[in-house]
Image: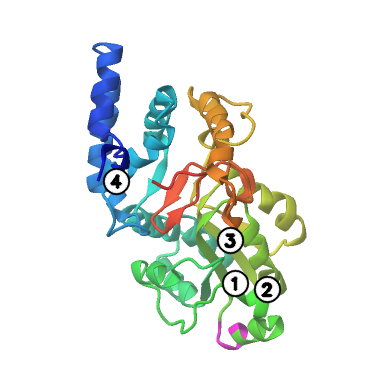
Amino acid sequence: MTEEQTPHQPPTVEELVARWTDATGDTPKYGAIRDLLLFLSRELYCDYQPFPEGPQFLERLARWLDNLRDDESGQQLLFEFVPWLLFIGRREMETMYRAAFTGPISRWIIDDAGLDIADPELSEKFSAAVRTTFFGSIAGMEIGSFAHINDLSGQSYRPEFRVLSRFGNFDQFRDEIQVDGFKRVVAVEDMVGSGTQMLEASPILSHVAPINVLLCPIVVAPAGAQAWHDVLEPDNPHMTFSPLFFIPPNATLSETAPTIPEHPLSNQFRRLINDTWDAVQGAHPSPQLKDGPFGFGRFGSLACLIQGSQTWRVKF
């Protein structure tokens, strides 16, 4: 193979950091980011499900940065922004499953069942109320893991409400859960971004009235919360919306800057995303890219779950 035929090998992250550090003097900035990413790649990023058997994170990161091989300042900007991505791994999600149940879900069940927190028999009565609470996912979350982690039993079917809204018999569902002794419904989901899937799940949950319903996303982006307030809340007094973790607007990277302070690099990154969008699309854009440079719903989430990226184009 001639030199001209030798495949291009992107410089490693270590090589890039050394080059940038030499060019900028004694600043430890890039070395500190590298050390943080080395730690996170061992302790957290290894959970990422689409690529558990593939190249290690830092190798994928080097390839990602190499997309801007002719724009060193753009590479540096990407590198600085990586630690600001919120990656929720397996252990973090399991902890959030427990926190959701012991927090917003338990409080809602206590209120809905009319329990008195000063009652000496509260524990027994609360356990009985949980057994009469029907749990399902809004749009395909691994509800079995949620039930196992929180020791929920006694329910043979844990459906996805978005699927039931498309293909189910609304009257039959409402009647069946009442016959089985369920008095309330809890719909959970690991991530609600734009709110589209939550809206798609709402028809059957709206139909179960007067049975009360709790919508409990583990993580919700501003657009998802807005979808609840604008569309579902006004016409569904039997529904309650109580997320565990709300992503604040200044922790996203939307098309326009928020009115509250955001990351100091956000405006530069916003320009970089727009400037590189044509290259990201290529000559034959994938249907997955139809939402534009800021991802699904164009809300610019910086959150990424173990099951896959919910962000703009950040798959390494």
Of callouts 2 and 4, which one flags the residue occurring earlier in the amino acid sequence? 4
Residue at 49 percent across and 26 percent down: it is 263
Residue shown at the point (37%, 36%) measured from the top left: 66
Q: CA distance from mark 3 to mark 1?
A: 11 Å
> First in sequence: mark 1 or mark 4?
4
Q: Earlier in the sequence, mark 3 or mark 1?
A: 1
Q: In what element is the residue under mark 2?
A: helix
Crowd rating for badge 3 (residues with CA inside 10 Å; few <14, some 14–19, many 20+)? many
Name the kind of residue labelled 3 in the image. Answer: Leu
Residue type indicated by callout 1: Phe
Label pair 2/4, CB-CB below 8 angstroms: no
Disc 2 to disc 1, C-alpha distance: 7 Å
Numbered tag placed on residue 215 in the rendering: 3
- Tell me if label 4 and label 3 are in contact, CB under 8 Å: no
In the figure, 239 relative to 89: above or below?
below
Tell me the mark number nearer the camera, choosing from 1 and 4: 4
Name the residue type under label 2: Ile
Q: Which residues are magenta?
A: 177-181
**Residue 285 position within the rendered picture, expressed as x and y whole percent measured from the top left:** 59, 51
| Disc 2 target residue | 204
Q: Secondary structure at mark 3?
A: strand
